[in-house]
Image: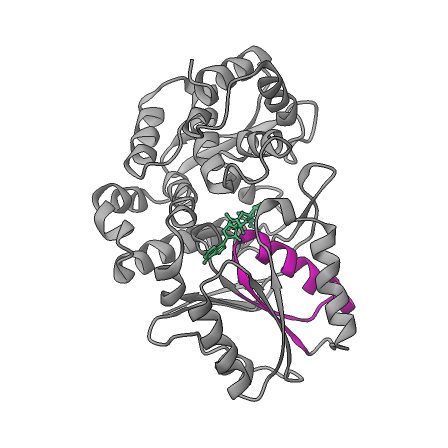
Amino acid sequence: MIVNYKVNNLSYKATFCHNKESPDIYKALSKLYCDKKMLLIIDKKLNSKFTKFLFKDLKKCGLKVTLLKVDGSKVNKNRKFLFKIIDKLIEMKFSKKSVLLSCGGGVVGDVSALASSLYLRGLIYFHIPTTMTAIVDSCLGGKTGINYKNIINSVGNYYHSQNVFISKNIIELIPKREFLAGIPEIIKSGFLNNNKILKLLLNNKKKCISRNYDFLSKLIKLTLITKIKFFQNDVFEETKRLNLNFGHTFAHAIEMSLKDKNTDLIRHGEAVGIGMLCEIFYSEGESNKFKFLKKILELYNLPTNLFYFKKLKRSKILERDIYSNIFLDKKKIGKFPRIIRLLNIGNSKVVEMKNNKKIRETISKVIFKV
Ligand SMILES: NC(=O)c1ccc[n+]([C@@H]2O[C@H](COP(=O)([O-])OP(=O)(O)OC[C@H]3O[C@@H](n4cnc5c(N)ncnc54)[C@H](O)[C@@H]3O)[C@@H](O)[C@H]2O)c1
């Protein structure tokens, strides 16, 4: 199964690979002119079963592979990681026709894509996403980035992976937490575009958590198609693509506020789940939509507030940090941070948050559930 899409008349694809230990990367490469040199960036935490097969396959088909093992996770999404990759490309004398293949979660993907876009102003870039967040969201759309000065993705650009490989083997090996943490991004797609996605999640918990591939590939495909629909004609996020940020104004504020306290306490997807609750609450309080979203999050044992994380205590400082980080929203064009208001399933719009009292109430009543 292949999902094809075009951006500015250039073709890209996501290839679902289900019948081999590792994806047929070389088949995709045989259709391109490349100099057979590859930098393979792999997240250290990936199951070695998969990486061994992948490495063997790539060498077998005549690619000269340089391996770089890296540590995913948000604390490493920084310039040190970025320049580690660029230094390696320089050291190995890679050309514009060399290939960078990254194999990891959203962090490895975002930083590798940024390095690919910068080195010689762009080389061939492929990606194998290895967390559910990366599979259903970050692998497509071309957003790259690093966190800098404690601002999420403050340095980045747009550079698309020519081919993304969604591997059945990887899906089976994803640790439970990295698997579940991607579900809020799937829910997001359901709310923004396709009620069918929500019904699938609600009615098929067993199939989902047991990693039933037929079920999951359908769910992943629907989610990716939703994402493509929103970014394809608005890559630079001026209009329609903004809607994909549903939940993200509050999510990023939470993530930035927790950064100093406990490095990787909350996953991005987990924060998006809480963030979506916040954005609905800000607009309409504990409405039916709010309750419906909470029900799906709880069904998958996902956090609906910060007390889910036992290590965390409510504090005035943390509340103040979250509040002030909301104003770092990258979608802001004037004085006010912006969120996505969900009018109905499949119908949303971008609005400014002008009511500071309501923002504080949302933090207190949703994030700290008083
Ligand atoms: N570019 C985009 O459009 C986009 C969209 C959503 C999120 N993001 C970014 O993605 C990042 C979050 O992605 P994430 O949740 O995948 O985080 P991540 O990449 O940090 O992965 C989470 C943890 O899982 C580990 N890991 C990854 N794959 C594994 C595997 N198969 N087996 C065992 N361990 C594994 C990582 O080392 C890390 O510790 C954030 O930086 C966010 O900004 C980008």
Q: In the image, 247: left or right of 263?
A: left
Pinpoint residue 303: horizontal percent, then vertical percent. 40, 32
User: Within the image, what quadrant is residue 166 found in?
Assistant: bottom left
Q: Is residue 283 visible?
A: no
Q: In the image, 304: left or right of 282?
A: left
From the viewer's side, name the closer residue of 233 and 167.
167
User: Within the image, what quadrant is residue 33 found in?
Assistant: bottom right
Instruction: Assign the C terminus to one quadrant of the image.
Output: top left
Pinpoint residue 201: horizontal percent, then vertical percent. 28, 44
From the viewer's side, name the closer residue of 327 and 19.
19
- Which residue is rendered at x = 59% and y = 45% of the image? 74
Pinpoint residue 212: horizontal percent, then vertical percent. 26, 58
- Which residue is rendered at x = 31% and y = 39% of the image? 300
Q: In the image, 290: left or right of 361?
A: left
Pinpoint residue 316: horizontal percent, then vertical percent. 59, 14
Q: Is residue 232 magenta?
A: no
Q: In the image, 74: left or right of 213?
A: right
User: Within the image, what quadrant is residue 317 found in?
Assistant: top right
From the viewer's side, name the closer residue of 324 and 50.
50
183 w.r.t. 247: above or below = below
Part of the protein shown in magenta = 98-127
- Which residue is rendered at x = 58% and y = 31% of the image? 258
258 w.r.t. 209: above or below = above
- Which residue is rendered at x = 31% and y = 58% of the image? 218
217 w.r.t. 24: above or below = above
Q: Is residue 252 visible?
A: yes
Tally of numbered discs? 0
Q: Is residue 119 magenta?
A: yes
